[in-house]
Image (spheres, rainbow, N blue to C red):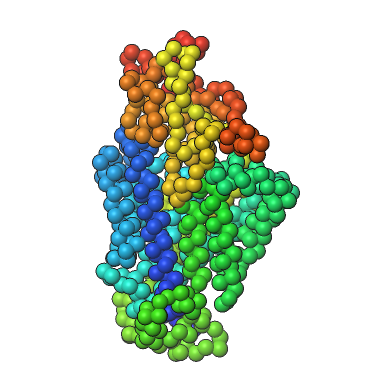
Amino acid sequence: MKSLKTTFRYLFEPAYGSTNHFVARWLFLRGLGLIYLSAFFALLFQVRGLIGSQGILPAAEYLQTVRPLGVLRFWYAPTLLWFSSSDRLLMALCWIGLIASIVLVANLWPRTMLVVCFLCFLSFVSAAQDFSGYQSDGMLLEAGFLSLFLAPSGRYPGLGKDQPPVRAAMFLLLWEWFRIYFQSGVVKLESGDPTWRNLTALYEYYQNGPLPTWIGWYLQHLPHWFHTATAAATLVMELILVWMAFLPGHWKTACFFIVTMWQVVVIATANYAFLNYLVLILAILLLDDAFLRRFIPLRWRDSLDVEAHHTGNAKLDEPPGPDRKANSLTPVTEVDSLTAIRSGLLAAVFAWIFYATVFPFVRMFRLDVPFPAKPVVWLEPFRIANQYGLFAVMTPHRYEIEFQGSNDGQHWDAYPFRYKPQDVRERPRIYAPYQPRFDWNLWFASLGSWQQNAIVPQTEESLLVNDRSVLGLFSGNPFPDAPPRLVRAVLWQYWFSSLEERRSQGVWWRRQLLGSYAPTLTRLPDGRFAIVDDATVSSPFQP
């Protein structure tokens, strides 16, 4: 019983927290604040066009469909937009989240700012529908929630030397980091995609991702042996090397440098928003103060050593084992009943999250373990216990949807995108961690039919009325004076240009028109929308 009590305190009570991860925690929380900042900054320019009152998928209409659930609607759609789904509140949430993230970076009231950032981002994700179906959103919400229990309290806690990081919170954050890698490796093999088994998965990777970069263009033209080697290295890293995170000392440090270099290359060759940045900063928790202190200025390093001496026993970083006596852990202050209750609640929350992540982890290996699934389902709306798996199946081709308007049905003008490939002479850019959700979703939509992707006909309708919010998602409007009479969506196939085409023609892309993607729409005098067939108006169109 005494050993169980010791282990409980070791994992969940701040007085027994890690005294060798103050700097790592400080760096991680600053990085998390910057990622929140990038997320809210991107939403400032997009949220009205995405889910505003005149947006493509209005949040108000979605919440109306959830309302019949009664009081349960607050659980299945946890968002502050229940108070009001107006554009004003949407923008307010973005601004509040943005300001809170800046304050978090400045290390002012870090725990409070984490609560604000989490609530604001969860409020958007819970109402954004198709525009929040990314694994990166779940990664940020899971990391943001767990960080509430990692961050020190107070107005300006500095390194928080009187509040050591709770070990269970650090473990769950590293558990998230590990699952992102390992589960991604497992799904690559379980998906049945032959390209991963024969190591050809990266032959077309750099040109077929959602939003390529110019560096990816150059890597695409490297010999096949390079792509074969990097595909093999990806599997080795995701399935084998990440286990180094559970080894002691220098193994963790080596693991940090391996995955960091890999993430830097991914960031340079593809725009995956804040996903890779988040995985990168999670890896900081692999490092300890014994390693990081050499990079700290001497005056701060001395302060760190002095405060560490007064905080507690550095040997607490070693997990309690059978050879250690239970009474070797001496808390700084006597643990009162309130602390015990708080630690008990914390343990219950962490146990629930851990169970909800272990359940799908075990099922990935098709083990028929009779675990109850309801605890997992209950947490799904909050996205704080997720299952990950990136690039299970590689995209073999690159398709791009383009919106075009016309007044005569003969001459069509394209609506220019801000980030998606379109002009073959425009160099692919690097803009992550900024996330253009509209452009991303169109890439996903191009892999299916318009019937499966309501955002395409909904966008066509918005362009037929020159809706300012939706037009803000484009870089320009070819019909500034009056909306076009007709709007259509066509499908192109894109390829990176060859080295010779790049030299002789100055193009980064080649493309071929494949035909219509979605019906051509027009607006009737009564305000309804209708499908146009051979320049004649047919029956009203219902998306």
Residue at far top of view? 536
Instruction: Give the position of the C terminus as an image quadrant.
Output: top left
**Vertical side of 36 occupied by 534: above or below:** above
Q: Position of residue 56 (x, y in %)?
A: 39, 33
Nearest the viewer among 157 and 270 is 270
Q: Position of residue 156 (x, y in %)?
A: 28, 70
Residue 157 appears in the picture as rendered: yes
Nearest the viewer among 30 and 361 is 30
Q: Position of residue 68 (x, y in %)?
A: 34, 39
Residue lying at 57% horizontally and 22% vertically, measured from the top left: 515
Nearest the viewer among 32 and 171 is 32
Residue lying at 37% horizontally and 59% vertically, measured from the top left: 33
Q: Position of residue 237 (x, y in %)?
A: 63, 61
Q: Is residue 439 left or right of residue 79?
A: right
Residue 82 appears in the picture as rendered: no
Count of number-bearing discs: 0
Residue lying at 37% horizontally and 31% vertically, measured from the top left: 471
> In which quadrant of the rendered view does residue 418 lie?
top left
> In which quadrant of the rendered view does residue 28 lie?
bottom left
Residue lying at 41% horizontally and 60% vertically, measured from the top left: 32
Q: Is residue 318 left or right of residue 187?
A: left
Residue at far front of view? 504
**Vertical side of 253 occupied by 224: above or below:** above
**Vertical side of 18 occupied by 446: above or below:** above
